[in-house]
Amino acid sequence: MFKRRYISALVIGAALSGCAGRASTAPQTGALPQQATAAQTSQAELAAFAAWRHDFRRRALAKGIKPAVFDRAFEGVSLSRQVIKLDGGQAEFTRQIWDYLDTATSATRVSTGRQKWETLNPTLQAIEERYGVDAKVVMSIWGMETNYGSYRGNTGTIEGLATLAFEGRRRTFAEAQLIAALQILQAGDVSPEKMRGSWAGAMGHTQFMPTSYLEYAQDFTGDGKRDIWSEDPTDALASTAAYLSRFGWQQGAPWGIEIRLPAGFDYAAADQNHLKPVAYWRSLGITTVNGRPLPDHGEAAILVPAGARGPAFAIFNNFKVIRRYNNATAYAMAVGHLADKLAGGSEFRSPWPRDERALSRAEKEELQRRLTARGFDTKGSDGVIGPNTIGAIRAYQQSVGQVADGYASATLLKQLR
């Protein structure tokens, strides 16, 4: 669910709900008295929504949207209780990365992907040739986003975005997407009835946000429309390839390679932003997991998503490109790993520490408080394991003679307790 450029249906909700509150610069939409009854609240909200829509119509027309297009798009649109519920009540993400990958790259998803590949092979080969992006990576994103088109979402894009723009916690973002959606309708690529997708505004087989659609969507079929909504996924797959190509995909290069780290490896060097020539990593004794020399695909960084007890990877430029599509490490790994499996690859060789349970948000906050109390400042206790917390964990681990991998685990929290 590109946050800013595109936000995938898988994670856009988290991005929206992660904001601290409503944008203070937006027009007031009627803060309701706490003592109002449920009926009064509903009535007041509907009136406030109508007022917002009236004001937004004026602003949309000032940006070039034709009155008839706006009125047609908003015909029958109302405040969606379901969207409000989903935006405000998302479950906390507490799955471990190996559980996420187990689901994302399951045998069923691989089998379905291979069947789709056989059916669409000529089209996929043509897309790969035009855009220079490995077709199985495009297939993998399709599989990740909508399970190869089997579930693309059924929320009206205008109603979903209008609800978020009025009630959501990222109103400026939602209104920008709504203007873009109206521009798409004005261009005639789709009708309001067919413009459907996730509750958060992501559309089509590979879940493009409206602004990204305007910039990157492709008419690969040549029918004069960039149709990412139809049963035929061709335009959507080509649009995904165009997006990856735009951000520097290197055809034939891997996203990453499972590696073997030498004894005594300094885990402070395991940082996605710590890019070094492959020759540098070779000089430290890093090899592939099979013990072969690390192949040179340009600069690489070292990734240890489960700390010293889990698999390690050398990640290359294409990993960064996938993260432009969805800025999450687990997502990028899943796309890469699924693509490898579609091409006949196997599971990772090194085992995951499956005995480690996931920390809840409250436990992460506790971990941060306890580290800070011991003199290892995490710069706050927000439950987000970022660079400050990782650095604090490493410093603590070094102080007690442990491998300083910076991994926030239940075992570490138990130790701090």
Image (cartoon, grey):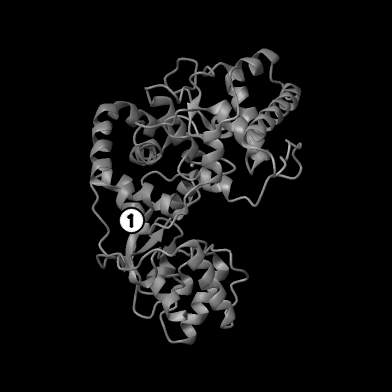
238 vs 160, left or right, is left
Residue at 59% of width from left, 32% of height from top?
161
383 vs 143, left or right, is right
Q: Secondary structure at mark 1?
A: helix
Farthest residue in the top direction? 68
Residue 249 or residue 108, whichever sits in front? 108
312 vs 199, left or right, is left
Residue type at numbered disc 1: Asp
The image position of residue 107, as x and y in percent, is 23, 45
Residue 182 or residue 86, whichever sits in front? 86
Residue at 72% of width from left, 27% of height from top?
56
Is residue 6 something that shows in the picture? no
Residue at 48% of width from left, 73% of height from top?
268
The image position of residue 160, as x and y in percent, is 56, 31
Q: How many numbered discs sit on the rendered protein? A: 1
The image position of residue 341, as x and y in percent, is 27, 47
The image position of residue 385, as x and y in percent, is 52, 64
Residue 379 or residue 137, whichever sits in front? 379
Q: Which residue is mark 1?
A: 99
Is residue 66 something that shows in the picture? yes
Residue 396 or residue 293, whichever sits in front? 396
266 relative to 64, above or below:
below
Farthest residue in the bottom direction? 400
Q: Residues within 10 Å of mark 1 (few under 14, many from 20)?
A: few
